[in-house]
Image (cartoon, helix red, strand yellow):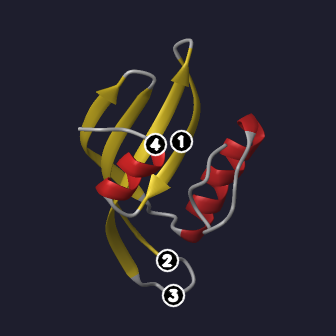
Amino acid sequence: SYPMGVEGTVYRGHAGLRRFIDDLFSAFPDWHPQILRTTDHGDKVLAEIRMAGRGVGSGLAIEQTVWQVTTFREGKMVGFHGYGSRAEALEAAGLRE
């Protein structure tokens, strides 16, 4: 599953990931992420990501930091989830520093 994007929306599978990217760029055509830091937790990776873009409808610029936990199985990404804080991401994923 790919629960980032519209709050409460879950994107599943390859088609879901493509829809997530389409939805993201439809709302923020100039969206660009910058990975600030990653930490390896075995089958999970925690990434701190700075995102910026301008809303297509409103024209408002956004810039925010999010934390993403990506889960891997047998060397392949099987899902990711975004969080508003590092503590929330660690707790939700059952990770420790």
The quarter in which the C terminus is drawn is top left
Q: Position of residue 95 (x, y in %)?
A: 37, 38
Question: Are there few (<14), some (14-19), or many (20+) residues within 10 Å of tag 4?
Answer: some
Q: Is residue 7 left or right of residue 62?
A: right
Q: Look at the numbered disc 1 and give the secondary structure of its residue.
A: strand
Give the Cα distance between marks 2 and 3: 5 Å
The reply to whether discs 4 and 1 touch (Cβ–Cβ < 8 Å) is: no
Of 16 and 46, which appears nearest the observer?
46
> Which residue, given by chain and number where applicable, does mark 1 sit on?
80
Above or below, 41 relative to 17: above
In this view, the mark in front (2 or 1): 1
Between disc 4 and disc 1, whose residue precedes?
1
Above or below, 22 relative to 72: below
> Which residue, given by chain and number where applicable, does mark 2 sit on?
55
Q: Look at the numbered disc 2 and give the secondary structure of its residue.
A: loop
The quarter in which the N terminus is drawn is top right
Query: Which amino acid does the dot numbered 1 rest on?
Result: Phe
> Which residue, given by chain and number where applicable, does mark 4 sit on?
93
Give the Cα distance between marks 1 and 3: 28 Å
Q: Position of residue 41 (x, y in %)?
A: 34, 27
In this view, the mark in front (2 or 4): 4
In this view, the mark in front (1 or 3): 1
Q: Is residue 9 left or right of residue 92?
A: right
Query: Which amino acid does the dot numbered 2 rest on?
Result: Gly
Between disc 2 and disc 4, whose residue precedes?
2
Q: Look at the numbered disc 3 and give the secondary structure of its residue.
A: loop
Q: Look at the numbered disc 4 and give the secondary structure of its residue.
A: helix
Between disc 2 and disc 1, whose residue precedes?
2
Q: Is residue 42 left or right of residue 80?
A: left
